[in-house]
């Protein structure tokens, strides 16, 4: 059945991937909601929790949760790598036929899991949970999110669905495609969109965070937006060609004007103000153009360094952790079974 996603009729393994950074206040609530929701599906499951360099009791609470349910597995990263990389680490380690990444703060309601699975089993490779509204978010965040989705929607080479977070279900073949994408700059919304496949969506209302505070400061969000735009669009680079062309045409006209005026009215020295304005304006434009090239150059620099995307300090609960980890460092990237080092299990 080459056209059907794996394991559709039969028993299958569902992986939940949960990036967690200082979520000690949310973990308890998260587990009490998420476990019944997956159990309702009636499949095998694993909950891959990625401890993204938490400085609180997140890891301790996760270990305790695993003592109660062995299907909770833990990837402990060496430091805080940020949500997108934590999610990549979790996806690399997850072994399910389908994977659902979701937030630990219950802003991605686990009650949707059965619906997502149902739509996946209908034959969709990816089912996206799209937010109907953002009641849980502040006005500023809602406005800026709106602006961002519109900007990137216009500029990106692939359509990036608006108001779709990372909450979705992905078939194993989508996962394999994701793993084949080596870029260091993991703008997951774009990467998810880029792979394509057969996509569907369901709509939900995004609730407020259950506990704790969002880790996204304004500055982080701004950088996130820039990452998104610069990794999925070359428009900012190309636009300078057009700017340059338009300015050249105007300059030519102005040159003719000056030449004619000098011929007719004679040499005319005053003009300090116009020269100054033009000079400042165009050096400003030059600077912006250079800055944009710098943005891309910086990203190229990061890519060519070819560092591992993330470093794993420890994994707990995986039988064959090294079979995963497409993006894990080479020294851990052993694809055959092999006696493992000092990992707790
Ligand atoms: N998160 C993470 N690493 C970070 C920041 C956040 O793994 O550096 C996790 C966090 O624990 C949560 C999810 O990413 O499970 C979403 O984070 P948050 O709620 O702060 O973002 P928001 O919902 O405001 O977009
Ligand atoms: Mg949140």
Image: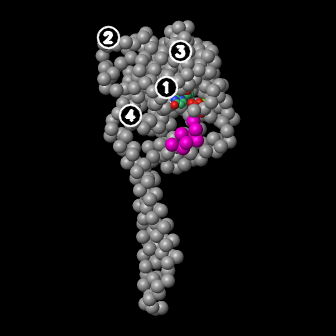
Q: Helix or strand or loop: what does disc 1 sit on?
A: loop
Mark 2: C-beta under 8 Å from nearest atom of ligand 1 = no
Q: Is residue 77 left or right of residue 301?
A: right
The x and y percentages for residue 197 are 45, 33
The x and y percentages for residue 268 are 47, 87
What is the CA distance from the residue labelled 4 to the residue labelled 2? 28 Å
Indicate the quadrant where residue 200 lies: top right
At 32% across and 13% down in the image, what residue appears? 337
The 10 Å Cα crowd at callout 3, few under 14, some 14 to 19, many 20 or more, is few
Q: Earlier in the sequence, mark 4 or mark 2?
A: 4
In the image, the segment drawn in magenta is: 216-223
What is the CA distance from the residue labelled 4 to the residue labelled 1? 21 Å
Instruction: Report which residue position mark 4 lands on.
Output: 181
Asked whether 30 or 274 is in front, the reply is 274
The 10 Å Cα crowd at callout 1, few under 14, some 14 to 19, many 20 or more, is many
At 43% across and 54% down in the image, what residue appears? 291
Mark 1: C-beta under 8 Å from nearest atom of ligand 1 = yes
Magenta run includes residue 85: no
Mark 3: C-beta under 8 Å from nearest atom of ligand 1 = no
Instruction: Report which residue position mark 1 lands on.
Output: 52
Task: Please name which of the two marks, 3 or 2, marks the residue nearer to the observer.
Answer: 3
Instruction: Report which residue position mark 2 lands on.
Output: 339
């Amino acid at each position: 059945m080459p056209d059907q996603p794996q394991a559709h009729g039969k028993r299958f393994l569902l992986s939940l991937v949960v990036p967690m950074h200082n979520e000690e206040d949310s973990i308890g609530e998260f587990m009490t909601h998420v476990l019944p929701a997956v159990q309702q599906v009636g499949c095998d499951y694993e909950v891959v929790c990625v401890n993204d360099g938490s400085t609180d009791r997140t890891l301790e609470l996760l270990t305790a949760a695993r003592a109660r349910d062995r299907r909770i597995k833990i990837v402990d990263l060496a430091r805080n790598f940020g949500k997108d990389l934590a999610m990549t680490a979790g996806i690399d380690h997850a072994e399910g036929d389908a994977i659902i990444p979701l937030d630990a703060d219950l802003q991605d309601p686990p009650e949707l899991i059965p619906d997502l699975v149902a739509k996946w089993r209908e034959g969709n490779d990816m089912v996206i949970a799209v937010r109907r509204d953002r009641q849980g978010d502040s006005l500023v965040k809602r406005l800026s999110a709106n602006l961002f989705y519109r900007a990137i929607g216009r500029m990106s080479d692939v359509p990036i669905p608006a108001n779709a977070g990372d909450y979705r279900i992905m078939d194993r073949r989508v996962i394999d495609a994701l793993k084949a994408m080596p870029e260091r700059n993991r703008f997951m919304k774009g990467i998810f969109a880029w792979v394509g496949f057969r996509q569907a969506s369901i709509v939900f209302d995004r609730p407020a965070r259950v506990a704790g505070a969002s880790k996204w400061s304004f500055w982080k969000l701004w950088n996130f937006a820039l990452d998104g735009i610069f990794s999925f669009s070359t428009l900012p680079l190309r636009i300078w060609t057009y700017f340059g062309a338009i300015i050249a045409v105007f300059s030519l006209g102005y040159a003719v004007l000056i030449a004619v005026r000098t011929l007719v009215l004679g040499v005319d020295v005053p003009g300090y103000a116009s020269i100054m304005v033009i000079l400042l304006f165009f050096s400003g434009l030059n600077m912006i153009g250079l800055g944009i090239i710098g943005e891309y150059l910086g990203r190229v620099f990061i890519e060519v360094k070819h560092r591992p995307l993330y470093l794993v300090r420890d994994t707990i609960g995986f039988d064959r952790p090294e079979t995963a980890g497409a993006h894990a460092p080479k020294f851990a990237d052993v694809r055959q079974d092999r006696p493992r080092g000092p990992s707790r299990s």
